[in-house]
Image (tube, rainbow, N blue to C red):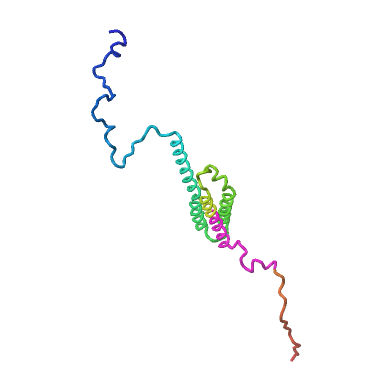
Amino acid sequence: MDKGKGVMGSRKWAVEFTDNSSTPSSRDIPDPPGFTRATHDQDDSTLSRQKKDAEANWKSQKAWEVAQAPFKNLLMMGFMMWMAGSTVHLFSIGITFSALWQPLSALQGVGKVFEPYKDSKVDLNAPKLLFIALNLGGMLLGVWKLNTLGLLPTHASDWVSSLPPAHEVEYSGGGNKRPV
C-alpha cells in the first residue's frame, strides 16, 4: 500500500449527508407552534441593530445601578453616625464632615459618573435625578448630625454676641435709710 493512498481511497463506512431522495424530508414537515426557525439570511443591519439595542439596554441598566449606589453609602453613613453618638468629639465630627463631603464631591462629578453610559438610545435624566436626590439626602443626613451635635447656630443664644445690648426699661434705686 502506498503511503496515504489507503486512507484516501474509497471508504465503505463513509456516510453521504446530501439528500437526493424524493421522499418527504424534515424540510417538508411544518414547525411546531411557538418555534421559529432561525434563518441564516438575516440582514447584517438587523444583527447590528439588535447588538446596539442590547448595548443600549445594558448601558441603561448600569446607569440605574450607578444611580442607586449612593443609597448603600447613605445607609452605611447613617449607621456610622448613630455609632458615633451625639457628643462632640473628634470621631463624630470627622464622620459628620465626611458625610457632608462625599455627597458634595459626588454631586460635582455627576457628568463624569454617567459619561460611560451616554448613548442616543439611553435616557440618563431619571438616573441622574435619582443620583442627585440620594446625594442630597446624604448631605441632609450630615446637616442633621451637625444639628444634633449642636454645631449649627439654630437658637437665639448662638447669636448673642451679635445682638445689641438690651435697653433698660425699669430703674430701681434705694432710698435714704435713716439710721435708727
Q: Residue at x 46, y 38 (%)?
A: 49
Q: Nearer the viewer, residue 75 or 116?
A: 116
Quadrant where the C terminus sits is bottom right
At 71% from the left edge and 81% from the top edge, which residue is drawn? 170
The structure residue drawn at horizontal position 59% and vertical position 63%, both measured from the top left corner, is: 150
Q: Which residues are magenta?
A: 135-162
Residue at image position (57%, 44%) is 112
Q: Residue furthest top?
A: 2
User: Along the line of sight, which residue is nearer the eye, 44 or 136?
Assistant: 44
* Furthest-front residue in this view: 22
In the rendered image, residue 142 lying in the magenta stretch gets the answer yes
Q: Is residue 74 left or right of residue 16?
A: right
State whether residue 83 is above or below residue 23. below
* Res 142 → quadrant: bottom right
Instruction: Measuring from the top left, give residue 32's x and y in whole percent.
Output: 28, 39
Q: How many marks?
A: 0
Percent across and percent down for residue 167 are 72, 76
| Quadrant into which the N terminus falls | top left
For this rendering, which residue is in front, 146 or 125? 125
Residue found at the far bottom of this picture = 180
Picture coordinates of residue 7, whole percent (x, y): 29, 14
Characterize the magenta stretch by its predominant secondary structure: helix
Residue placed most toward the observer, 132 or 60: 60
Q: Is residue 12 above or below residue 141?
A: above
Q: Position of residue 120 (x, y in %)?
A: 52, 43
The relative height of residue 58 versus residue 79 in the rendered view (above or below) is: above
- The reply to whether the magenta stretch includes residue 150 is yes
Is 173 on the left-hand or right-hand side of 87? right
